[in-house]
Image: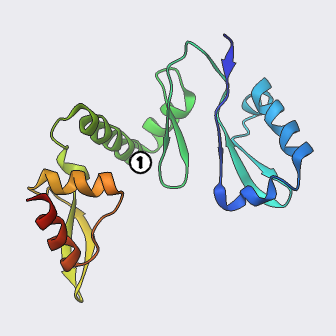
């Protein structure tokens, strides 16, 4: 085995990739060789589409690294990562939100109780339900159903429908 390089392509800019096959190939090869990492390049442009691709630092196959898609960005979480350290010490609030997210995901897959900070609370506003401050919802089954369906009810009637389905 050797090194691995992870890429994220913004889907809204992907249509430009077919128009520039040579450019994308050249830039992917540079990224895999570590040239971009050594010069501090994390995103590159394809054609006229600015920041089309996010490039992660090439990692040796034994390195343990987690990549988290979070708020339209990709964050690298690893004990030997400058990016993780930068995030932790220079953006501690964002780092904590990412850690909370990861803890929630791990808890869900281990079948444990969902940590409270990441369960949305719904409030009524102009006959619509919106996600408000992060507070616990007592019915864990409802939240698991939302996560499984990849939806969060946006109206009171939708919320009632979920309660009926689960009971």
- Kindly identify the residue that appears in the image at 20 percent across and 35 percent down: 111
Image quarter of the N terminus: top right
Is residue 106 shown left or right of residue 60?
Answer: left
Q: Say which of 19 and 54 sits in front.
A: 19
Give the vertical position of 53 relative to 61 (above or below): below
Q: Whole-percent x and y of residue 150?
A: 36, 57
Question: For mark 1, does the 10 Å Cα neighbourhood hold few (<14), some (14 to 19), or many (20 or more) residues?
Answer: some
Which residue is at a point 47% across and 49% down the rendered structure image?
A: 70
Q: Quadrant of residue 63?
A: top right
The residue closer to the viewer here, 102 or 109, is 109
Q: Which percent across, then down, holds residue 134?
A: 22, 59
Question: Which residue: 76% across, 60% down?
Answer: 15
**Residue occupying the far bottom of the picture:** 126
In the image, residue 48 above or below residue 60: below
- Total labels drawn: 1
* Horizontal side of residue 124 vs 52, given as left or right: left
Q: Is residue 139 left or right of residue 68?
A: left
Q: Quadrant of residue 10?
A: bottom right
Badge 1 element? helix
Q: In the rendered view, tell whether residue 124 sits above or below residue 13.
A: below
**Residue tagged by mark 1?**
94
Q: How is the image coloured?
A: rainbow
Quarter of the image for the C terminus: give it.
bottom left
Residue at 72% x, 59% y is 13
> Residue 92, percent across and down?
39, 43
| Residue 31: image location, x then y, percent | 77, 32
Direction right: furthest residue: 22
């Amino acid at each position: 085995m050797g090194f691995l390089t992870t890429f994220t392509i913004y889907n809204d800019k992907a249509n430009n990739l077919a128009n520039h096959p040579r450019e994308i190939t050249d830039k992917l090869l540079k990224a895999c060789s570590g040239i971009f990492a050594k010069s501090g390049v994390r995103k590159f442009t394809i054609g006229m589409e600015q920041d089309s691709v996010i490039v992660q630092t090439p990692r040796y196959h034994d390195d343990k690294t987690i990549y988290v898609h979070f708020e339209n960005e990709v964050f690298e979480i690893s004990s030997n990562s400058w990016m993780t350290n930068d995030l932790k010490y220079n953006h501690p609030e964002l780092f904590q939100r990412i850690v909370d997210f990861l803890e929630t995901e791990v808890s869900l897959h281990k079948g444990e109780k969902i940590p409270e900070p990441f369960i949305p609370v719904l409030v009524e506003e102009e006959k619509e339900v919106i996600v408000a401050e992060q507070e616990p919802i007592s019915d864990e089954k409802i939240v698991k159903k939302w996560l499984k369906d990849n939806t969060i009810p946006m109206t009171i009637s939708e919320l009632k429908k979920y309660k009926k389905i689960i009971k």
